[in-house]
Amino acid sequence: MEKYLGKFITEELDQLYDKSYDIPDIVTSIREAAILTGLTEDTIRYYEKVGLLPFAERKTNGHRQYRKDQILGIIFLTRLKATGMTIEQMKHFRELSEHGADTLEARYAILEEHQRKIQQDIANLNETSKIIAYKLQHYRELSEHPDLEDTHCDTNP
């Protein structure tokens, strides 16, 4: 995992990823890696090509194989992407992690800033959800008691 995201203890990661107990110690194909990570095989190849992931180890027949910690690292990257981190930002984070403890503060700062962004996104989504809930209630009331003269569209619940 050091090459991906910094050193983690597998048991700690098992607690973070609900499916990690299903990941074998060695994943013997890109197809299996795709199933475990939720990515397509093409996406994994693309991520390797652009440097987001280091190239996978190869078996004697040339097929990719991955260790459990590599799969968990890929899953972590998918979580970052799902929360809006760009490929370039994730690539920079991974590159920093290759330098070990010397870049710990920088990696911490990146994740801390990203968490702030996620929390702001959640707050914005919660506000939007409240407005939608208000509108749904308004439409429900209109459907139960139609008043064609009432055209107000107040967005303040």
Image (tube, rainbow, N blue to C red):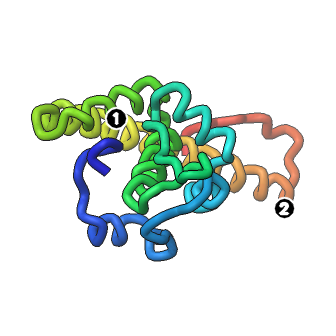
Q: Say which amino acid is labelled 2.
A: Glu
Q: Which residue is mark 2?
A: 144
- Of circles 2 and 1, the one toward us is 1
- Toward the viewer: 139 or 99? 99
- Point out residue 51 in the picture as x, y percentages from the top left corner: 46, 28
- Point out residue 22 in the picture as x, y percentages from the top left corner: 51, 74
Q: Residue at x 71, y 52 (%)?
A: 136
Give neighbour class at mark 2: few <14, some 14-19, many 20+ (Cα, 10 Å).
few
Task: State whether residue 38 appears in this view.
Answer: no
- Toward the viewer: 125 or 55? 55
- Point out residue 28 in the picture as x, y percentages from the top left corner: 56, 61
Q: Reading the chain from its start, which is encountered first: label 2 or label 1?
A: 1
On the rendered structure, is 112 left or right of 65? left
Say if 60 sits above or below 97 in the image: below
Q: Residue at x 27, y 32 (%)?
A: 110
Task: State whether residue 143 appears in this view.
Answer: yes
What is the number of the mark on residue 94?
1
Q: Residue at x 59, y 44 (%)?
A: 131
Give neighbour class at mark 1: few <14, some 14-19, many 20+ (Cα, 10 Å).
many
Q: Secondary structure at mark 2?
A: helix
What is the number of the mark on residue 120?
none
On the rendered structure, is 1 left or right of 155? left
Distance from label 2 to label 1 (Cα)?
56 Å
Q: Say which amino acid is labelled 1.
A: Arg
- Point out residue 77 in the picture as x, y percentages from the top left corner: 45, 44
Say if 140 sits above or below 49 in the image: below
